[in-house]
Amino acid sequence: MVTLVGSGRNLSVIVVAEYETSVMPSCPACDAPLRAWGYARERAIGLPEGGLRRLRPRRVRCPSCRTTHVLLPPYCLLRRADSVHTITAALLDHVAGHSHRRIAERLHRPAATVRGWLRRATARAAFWRRHGMIYAYHLTPDAGPLQPRATELAEALDVLGKAGRAAQEQNADWAATDP
């Protein structure tokens, strides 16, 4: 699986499964084959149980359009020092009614960081819900209606989970991964 996540001036980030980093994807801009071009800076990714995972992602370059890309594993988010699982755990705890301080204590993160995640997620919930619905129905047209939830963020997380499960069902390679 290869997904373009974000881009800068001459740099974009592509999410690939960890085992696929040896296979070079094609350039998202011009579809030319990418070539290895060293490694991006090493980074530490925060895990939900409080530990850190060191990562030095592969950097690739397109010989045609001369754009560089970074290949990130699926548990990383663009411009975030914490894993998808850590941030998702915080969002699920928030939907369950926990305060940002309690969540921060449980995840071993600064309270201000967790508060920022929750504010951003709450502000973007309508966008996530809408796009989650598009992906869920694109993957499974009979996905069925959503159950109404107490908050828009809860509905967004619900529909994103439904889309993730549908993607797992359609791709046998992803069966062992967490949506």
Image (tube, rainbow, N blue to C red):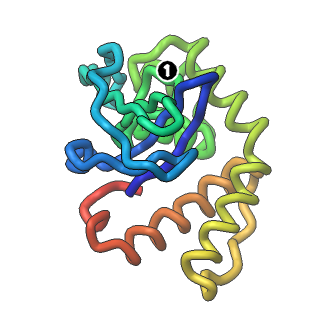
Q: Is residue 162 something one can see in this rendering?
A: yes
From the viewer's side, name the closer residue of 78 and 155. Answer: 78
Along the viewing direction, whichever of 8 and 17 lies nearer the viewer: 8
Say which residue label 1 marks.
104
Q: What amino acid is found at the position of numbered circle 1 in the picture?
A: Ala
Along the horizontal axis of the image, is 112 left or right of 86? Answer: right
In the rendered view, tell whether residue 138 sits above or below residue 13.
below
Q: Residue at x 53, y 23 (%)?
A: 79
Q: Position of residue 122 (x, y in %)?
A: 74, 38
Quick check: 117 above or below 71? Answer: above
Q: Quick check: 52 above or below 120? A: above
User: What quarter of the picture does the N terminus occupy?
Assistant: bottom left
Residue at 54% of width from left, 66% of height from top?
Answer: 163
Give the residue at x 35% y 23%.
Answer: 45
Residue occupying image coordinates x 44% and y 49%: 32
Left or right of 9, for residue 27: left
Return the x and y of residue 25 as percentages of the image width and height.
Answer: 36, 50
The x, y position of residue 151, in whole percent, is 75, 50
